[in-house]
Amino acid sequence: MTKVSYKRSWAEPYRMKMVELLKMTTRPQRVKAMKEAGFNTFLLRSEDVYIDLLTDSGTNAMSDRQWSAFMLGDEAYAGSSSFYRMEAAIQKYYGYKYVIPTHQGRGAENILSKILIKPGDIVPGNMYFTTTRLHQELAGGKFYDIIIDEAHDALSEHPFKGNVDLSKLEVLVKKYGAKKIPYVSIATNVNMAGGQPISMQNLRELHTYCQSQGIRIIHDMTRVAENAYFIQQREKGYEKKSIKDIVKELCSLTDGATMSAKKDALVNIGGFLATNEREVYEEARNMVVVYEGLHTYGGLAGRDMEAIAVGIGESVDDYHQHARVGQVEYLGHQMMNYGIPIVKPIGGHGIFVDAKAFLPHLTQDQFPAQTLAAEMYIDSGVRTMERGIVSAGRNEKGENYYPKLELVRFTIPRRVYTQAHMDVIAESAATVFNRRKKIKGLKMVYEPKYLRFFQARFERL
Ligand code: PLI
């Protein structure tokens, strides 16, 4: 393979052969749509959206090779050859021994949590993710955040904000004992911190410590190749290593994994659970039948497994990652040039705008991030997502959590939008930024009981 030259501009290692036409809307149409959606971007109809940055999950564009592989899908109920091709790709690129397919990431989280966690157990992790933590809690565990403090600081420029603070883990081990900790939950490229990576050195030190204590490391490898890209770019000794080799090394320092293939692996649906332990595999193989489907399809069509097998290979290509993260960085730099406050360093899957700094005249109770997401849509039809007080919800006493980070996520789907789209997004953010002082906050007029950010409704103050 030719080495990527990072001295030159990146460009996409593909060209377009089919395009999806979008509906263009006017400002009055968008004002109406936003009102009807109760100022919640989750409640918009996607046909009213011009550039959809709600999530990078399942929104990727598949390649010609993935679409061709679709036609090879073996839809047999049992023993599908598509499963064996997906299993072989996972073993080859990630190195895990045993594989159980699931319909998406949370299907794997459900099964693994049920197998490994007993009521009263402690699950430390490098920041939570919503579904991951919920499954740990539903299995009777309690999540503890052991990520470094810098991860909670939008302004910290630490190159590896996904790192674990080992002293926080040692405190938990001393307090509860290693037997109460079935595993440490490690995400590669930490979503909630802004798509921030863990370093190889930090993971190696964690691995050594966990081995000495007899504690597993379970890897949420949803964005592992993007994490590997940052290691290649930032960590000493990895400059000349390929993303493929770095991904394999990351996985080798962990004992098992859950994966949402809808992100890194470049597909629209799918996931899996992987483990190196025979007993865990045997149990998972039995349990998947209850929740997902037989152990050779786990809720997926044969064609989905074919697309995952091909997508995994494409995701570890150096040129692909250079263009993927390069595009996110391009947008981030455009926004910084306009003076827009964003979480730094720029993450792997999106730009996280600091809504508290963007709209300092709004109190957190006036929902600055929710407000900004609504304003972005009205300005240009760009759909983003609130990650602040609305997402954080309420505690057991019914009081609002007031999270330190009040963010709007501009998530970039893979291989979907062009550099010109990035310019439009940045210009729109700048337009909103220039009239920020005139922007009024929101009040919540409908609040659902669970995961309120999906369906809550708001009105302008
Ligand atoms: O959406 P799933 O069930 O395939 O995967 C759940 C999931 C697990 N871990 C991490 C780090 C995620 O980011 C994740 C899903 N993320 C979504 C949907 C997102 O919009 O970020």
Image: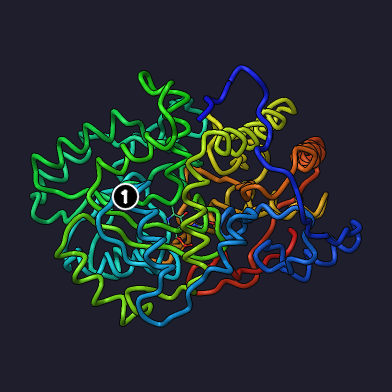
Q: Is residue 366 visible?
A: no
- Res 11 → quadrant: top right
Residue 112 located left or right of residue 318: left
Q: Write the residue at 32% across / 52% down.
A: 91
Query: Where in the figure is residue 280, as x and y percent of width and height?
Result: 18, 64
Identify the image quadrant of the C terminus. bottom right
Residue underneath mark 1: 219
Residue 433 located left or right of residue 106: right
Q: Secondary structure at mark 1?
A: strand
Q: In the image, is residue 91 above or below residue 324? A: below
Query: Where in the figure is residue 65, as x and y percent of width and height?
Result: 60, 55
Relative to the observer, which residue lies in front, 456 or 107?
A: 107
Query: What's under tag 1, amino acid-wise?
Result: His
Query: Where in the figure is residue 319, as x and y percent of width and height?
Result: 57, 34
> Which scheme is used to colour this image of the protein?
rainbow
Relative to the observer, which residue lies in front, 167 or 56?
A: 56
Q: In the image, is residue 5 above or below residue 272? A: above
Q: In the image, is residue 214 above or below residue 80? A: above
Query: Where in the figure is residue 330, as x and y percent of width and height?
Result: 67, 31
